[in-house]
Image (cartoon, rainbow, N blue to C red):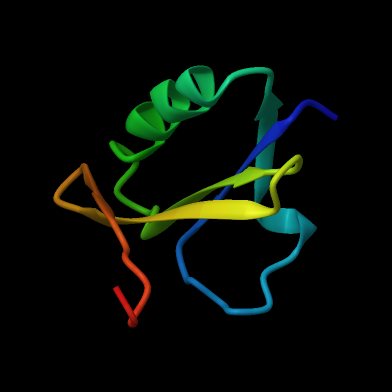
Amino acid sequence: MKRYALFCGAYNLQMGGIKNFQKSFETEEAAKEKTEQIAKDPFVDWVQIFDKKTDAATIYKVIDGKLVECKADNE
């Protein structure tokens, strides 16, 4: 599996699973490009890019076919 794992789904369950895994990418830019394509799917509510090297995740809410990055409550 490559460094950046992409997950998405219709419901954002805090304990998501492998069924939400879409694909992995070598670069964050490639993963982000794919998220923009996924956002056009009317049945997708959220998208997440997970960096396996840093254990950091970027989570997006999909609103009207566009990505809106979710910020942590403490930011």
For image coordinates 51% across by 18% down, the residue present is 30
The percent position of residue 49, horizontal first and vertical second, equals 54, 44
Name the image quarter holding residue 38.
top left
The answer to whether 73 is drawn above or below residue 60 in the figure is below
Question: Residue at image x 56%, y 77%?
Answer: 13
Q: How many marks?
A: 0
Q: Quadrant of the N terminus?
A: top right
> At 47% from the left edge and 71% from the top edge, which residue is drawn?
11
Q: Is 6 above or below relative to 47? A: above
From this view, report whether residue 55 is shown above or below residue 27.
below
Residue located 68% across and 32% down the image: 23
Q: Which residue sits furthest right?
A: 1
Residue 19 spot, x, y in % from top left: 73, 56
Horizontal relation, residue 42 to residue 56: left or right: left
User: Horizontal and vertical percent for residue 32?
Assistant: 43, 29
- Foreground residue among 27 and 9: 27
> Which quarter shows the C terminus?
bottom left
Residue 44 placement, left or right of 69: right
Image-quadrant location for residue 33: top left
Q: Tell whether 66 sits left or right of 59.
A: left
